[in-house]
Amino acid sequence: MIIYKNLNKIKNFKKSVIAIGNFDGLHLGHQKVLKQGYLKAKKNKLNFGVITFEPLPVMFFNKKILNYRINNLDQKIEGLRRLKIDFLTIIKFNKKFSSLNYKEFIKKIIFQKLNSRFIFISKNFKFGKNREGDVEKLIYNESLFNYKTCVSKALKKGNKVLSSSIIRSKIKKGKISQVNKFLGREWCIEGKVIKGKKRGRKIGFPTCNIKLDEYVVPKIGVYAVKVNINKFKYKGIANVGYRPTFRGKVLLLEVNIFNLKANLYKKKIKVNFIKFIRPEKKFKNINELKIQIKKDIIKVKK
């Protein structure tokens, strides 16, 4: 997969099949759209590409939204690579781009820059300044700009259409089993291990500390997790929260990795969430905390 961050450099991939969207989480609904695009490209002997935006538009327009993403950009890129995408175009979502109206988007991006043959989108796709562009406007302009709009039928889970919004809601509620089912894989937070106050080590449960950065904040509490370090996989227990027993004020993901004694400071690790165990709570003293951690570990290992 070739990655472009400048539309002017795309030459070999014009007249392709294109899927457009944020694709935050790359859930099963997204995967359905992308699979359909891939099959259409293969059938017509065309290349298949994806257009996505960075940062996510909602985070650009509302600077107060700090924790929103299901996955980070690196995870999105890796997920698209696994789905056999030929090329990925990452459009910088800034003031200049956000001022393009829907007609300019179709003319300048879809036609002039990419000269796309087929456009794959979801039914609720919106684009252009003030989100004025939609499926109907794309279809209306097909003959003028020589492309065909392909609207993927929504993937439903129960009575609801599967969406990134539903998955964010499930993460916030600690419904990790459902989240993993909707994603088609284990939800993962990745980041570099930062220095902590070594309290975990002092009480016999050393932890790797990671900031959540822009990730959506899962339900505060304890989780069963799997940890990927380079190509090695481990099981462990994690706490998302503020450490109220120690009067903590900074939100952290703390991970105790089973059967591993190593200094992982500044190392990049991936924490896959498996199951919510219990809410975070404040203990009267460290002894009570240690007793509870031992119980939690037994439960997680089971």
Image (tube, grey):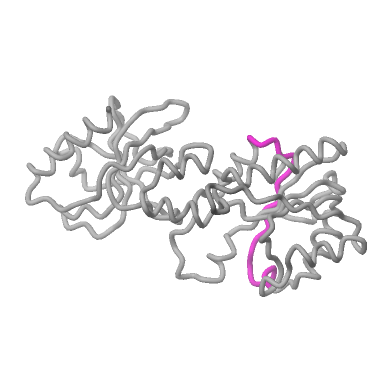
Q: Position of residue 102 (x, y in %)?
A: 76, 70
Quarter of the image for the N terminus: give it: top right
Quarter of the image for the C terminus: give it: top left
User: In the displayed structure, does residue 164 sit left or right of residue 135?
Assistant: left
Q: Nearer the viewer, residue 65 or 119?
A: 119
Residue 97 magenta-drawn? yes
Q: Residue at x 71, y 72 (%)?
A: 132
Q: Residue at x 9, y 43 (%)?
A: 288
Residue 227 magenta-drawn? no
Q: Nearer the viewer, residue 221 or 244?
A: 221
Q: Residue furthest front?
A: 159
User: In the displayed structure, does residue 37 sit left or right of residue 300?
Assistant: right
Q: Quadrant of residue 74?
A: top right
Q: Position of residue 116 (x, y in %)?
A: 84, 52
Q: Which residues are magenta?
A: 82-98
Q: Quadrant of residue 236?
A: top left
Q: How many marks?
A: 0
Q: Position of residue 17 (x, y in %)?
A: 80, 46
Q: Position of residue 103 (x, y in %)?
A: 81, 70
Q: Residue at x 68, y 55 (%)?
A: 122
Q: Is residue 301 above or below residue 163?
A: above
Q: Nearer the viewer, residue 157 or 17?
A: 157
Q: Is residue 137 above or below residue 277?
A: below
Q: Is residue 180 above or below residue 103?
A: above
Q: Residue at x 24, y 60 (%)?
A: 249
